[in-house]
Every structure is written in structure tokens, then in C-alpha cells.
Image (cartoon, coloured by chain):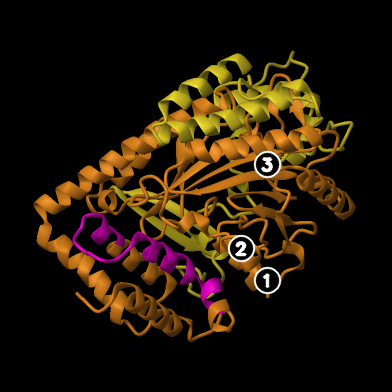
Chain colours: A orange, B yellow
Amino acid sequence: MIDLSLLADGGVGWLDASGPSSHLVLSTRIRLARNLAGRVFQGRNSETEREDILSVVERAARESVLLRRATKFRLDRLERTDRQLLHERHLVSKELAGLDADGRVRSGASVLVQDRIGVMLNEEDHLRIQGLHSGFALEATYAEVDRLDAELGQRLAFAFHPEFGYLTSCPTNVGTGLRASVLIHLPGLVLTKEISKVLQGLAQVGLTFRGLYGEGSEVVGNFFQLSNQTTLGSSEHELLDHLGKMVRQVMDYEEQARQVLLRDAPAIIEDKVWRAYGLLRYARALSFEEAMNLLSGVRLGVGVSLIPDVAMYTLNKLLVYTQPAHLAVAEGVAPTDADLPIRRARFVRKVLESEVGRRG
Amino acid sequence: MSCDQCREREAVIHLTQIVNEQVTTLHLCERCAAEKGVESPSGVVKTPLGSFLAAMGKNLPETEPTPRSSETCNRCGGSLQDFRESGRLGCPECYRWFEVPIRDLLRRLHGSTHHVGERYAEQGSAPAEVRIESADLREQLRLAVETENFELAAELRDRLRVLE
């Protein structure tokens, strides 16, 4: 079993709900795709080459300020539950964790993590420099990621083309290599059925959306990851400004949708959020999907001040710790355990009881 | 996660649809997906570039010095055919070797072929040092503005201007 306590904040600093606009935005993530010059990309390289990349980059990281004390996890040497745990914590991608359909972990697949930043190694690109902050914090996240990129770039030769910019294994990432994602909760737009219009609008301005776990994941609990689609032809700051403007607009739409719901259907909304709270508080078995949807309802209730005394931090914590691998590890069972829904309901009741007190 | 259709096999395709303003996601195994007419992951779905790749090179005028599908990169041995299948290039050199079709692809993907962002500065070079320092200053500036320390912010802004 891996020890996530090795990380200063257990790698969950992003869920402390301390960041800007935390009632709507859970986290901001930025990654930069980088490859080492003169080496073939991951898809065509060998185990030996991946080991070599790992040691070259790790050496550079240990000399840097930002990753000097980084904790290293070798995904290729971890059990599936541990890999899933790191993925659920948003520290590694599904691909790196070997949780894709084929279920294989690539040799050399690793991640270095220190505080809110890190670097995935031997992912689709040799390096995926990443930063993850609580709330809506594009600038602060980019400042750290940019600095780490500069620090590593001083010690490593990156593949760079004068016209195309940073070269990546997939041409969809070429140029800046930058993908910024904002994980946002939009129950108001879903309930008022405005969401598809908003998502279509975003597509028209070059943005895209994904589910809770990024690429290839489905939308659960009304959480959407909004991110830039293109990476070439605009500077990093232009990409971030554009995404930031659009996210602020979506946040306004969401607030408006909530006002409309409270104005036109107050009784229905009140019933919906309290019903979600009641189920979380008293249910005896909860699937992950159901827990996510109920948490979304309660989150909405707290956001519009219908449910007092529940902290966003408590809800974020439940969101992370009720995920299959987290729950399984906490309970000392396998993530496939048949009793997991019962254990999940018990866990949720316990947290709500101790953190919210008896009321409602 | 099991398939929404047969509830037996593992779902490998996650299809998000927007119908009548409702976003729904279908989780399907390969067989049920094929029955529903959704491309299997071994087909186009695997590469998000699907149609781009299929069309790549086809519409180019004959006279352009386009490498043939069978031609391979002299560094990694990858061909355009490999790229069409996997959606991934073999190595940085592929971008030079297949420059013409790649430029065409980039234009369609990004609406541009010219990188205008951060430029890679050689190891230990002055520009790299400047970038680290300016990233530091920018972060300090952000904090100064956030804490409404405008005197410090003004000073930091001046230093940034000199640096950049």
C-alpha cells in the first residue's frame, strides 16, 4: 500500500475549498506537454529509453527548486488499487495509471509530486508538467507551472521547432503544449436545461468540456471540466485569458439559472436539495454515482443558502473519499468489494454526523 | 463499469450525446457499440483526429512534394500510415520529415501553424534565467494586488517591465 501521507497535504490541497469562487469551481489544472529533443516519442520508444528518460528528468527535478523534495511514485510498480487512488486524487491521468480499457501500465510510468505541482513521466509525452490549485485560479496555477517549465528547461533539452513551437507526440497539443482545465459545478444550468446551449456555445469559441476525470470520462454529479481546445497560434496568456473570460461567463449563467430556479420553482428546489441531504444522511447503501449526484444536490443547496452548516470542504472531502479506491483503502477491502455501497453510506453518515451535527 | 446495453461486458466507449438539450452519456462495450453503429475503439474513435487523418494528404495537389504513405521518417522509421492509425507521431523529427501534410493538419486543427507563445530557451541561457525571475515577479505581483499592497505592486510592475 502506498503512503500518500508522504505528500505534505496528501496531494489533496486542491480540495480545501480555499480558492477563489470555490462554491462553483472545485479546482484549476494546467499542464504543459514537453518532450526531450533527439529522442523518439513514447509510442515508439523502448523500456530502456523510458527508464533513461525517467532518470534524466528526475535528476533535473532534484536540482530544481520546485521539485527538489518531490515524492516519486512509480506507477509501473504499484498495485491497481494504488494506481487508482492516485488517479482519483487527480495526480495522474487514467492512461498513466494503466486504467484504460486494456488495463496495462507502461514500464517507466511515474509521477513526481511536490505540493501543488508535479510532472508525469512517460505519459503520452515524455513530460507532462502539471499544477493543480483549489478554486478558480488560472493565473496562480500558470505562474507555478511556468516556473517549473523554465527550471526544467534549463537542465533538459526540450524538442522545439521554430515555427510549430513545442513538439508533442499528438499534433493536437503542439505549440504551447498547454491545456488548462477548470472543474466547475453546474447544477443550475443542468436543471434549467440550458447546459447544452452553453456547451455548444463553448465549442464555438474553441473550448471543450470533459467529465470529472478528464479525457474520456463521463459527466457525473453535474461536474464539468472546461478547457481550451487548441494549443497553437495563441500565447499561453491569451489562451488563459480566453478560457478565464468564458469560465466567468459560465459562472454568471449558472448564478442566473439558480436565481431563476429559486424564483420560479422554490418549493421544488428546496425539496430536491433537502431530499438529497436526507438520503446522504440516512441511506444504508450508496453507489458512487448516486453519492455523486446527491452531493451535487447538497452542494447546490449550500450554494443558494438553503442548507446551512455544511461546509464546501466537507462536501469536497466526501467527493474524494467516497470514490471506489479511496473508500476501499480506508475500509481495508478491495475496490470490487460487494459491500462497498454499504460501506460508502456508513462513511458518508459518519462524516456528516461529525461535521454537521444533528439538525435538519 | 459495465456496458449500459448488455450489462455484462466492460464498457470501453463513453459516448456523450446532446439530444433535445439533454446531455446523456452512454457507456458501451465494443460489441454493443458496433451494433449501435458507433465506431469501435480500434477504428476512428481511438484517434480524436479521425476524419482529419483519413483526409490528410488526399486533397493535396499532386505537384506538392508530399511524402507517400509508405515513406518513413529517417529518425524513427514511422510513416504517415502509422500516424493515421495511432494518431501519434514517432519523434520530433517527424515534424520536419512530414512538414507539408503536418502544416496542413495543424492549420485545420488549430487554425494556425505559427507558435506565438513561450519560446524554448537553451539550457543555462540568459533568457531562461529571465523567465524564472519574471515568473517569480509575476507571482509576487499577483499576491501584492490580492493583498492590496499597491505600492509594492507598482514597484514589482516596474521591475517586470525592465526585465521583459
Residue bounds of the magenta highlight: A299-328
Disc 2 and disc 1: Cα gap in Å?
A: 10 Å
Q: Which is more toward the observer, A8 or A4? A: A8
Residue drawn at (86%, 37%) of the image: B76
The subunit carrying tag 1 is: A
Residue A318 lies in the magenta-colored region: yes
The subunit carrying tag 3 is: B
x and y, in percent, of residue A55 in the image? 84, 50
Query: Considering only vertical position in the picture, is A148 above or below A47?
Result: above
Residue B120 appears anywhere in the view? no
Task: Say if labels 2 and 3 share a chain.
Answer: no
Residue labelled with disc 1: A2
Mark 3 residue crowding within 10 angstroms, few (<14) / some (14–19) / many (20+): many
The subunit carrying tag 2 is: A
x and y, in percent, of residue A315 in the image? 37, 64
Residue labelled with disc 2: A86
Residue drawn at (62%, 56%) of the image: A92
Disc 3 and disc 1: Cα gap in Å?
A: 34 Å
Query: Is B101 on the left or on the right of A319, as rendered?
Result: right
Amino acid beneath label 1:
Ile
| First of labels 2, 1 by sequence position | 1
Amino acid beneath label 2:
Leu
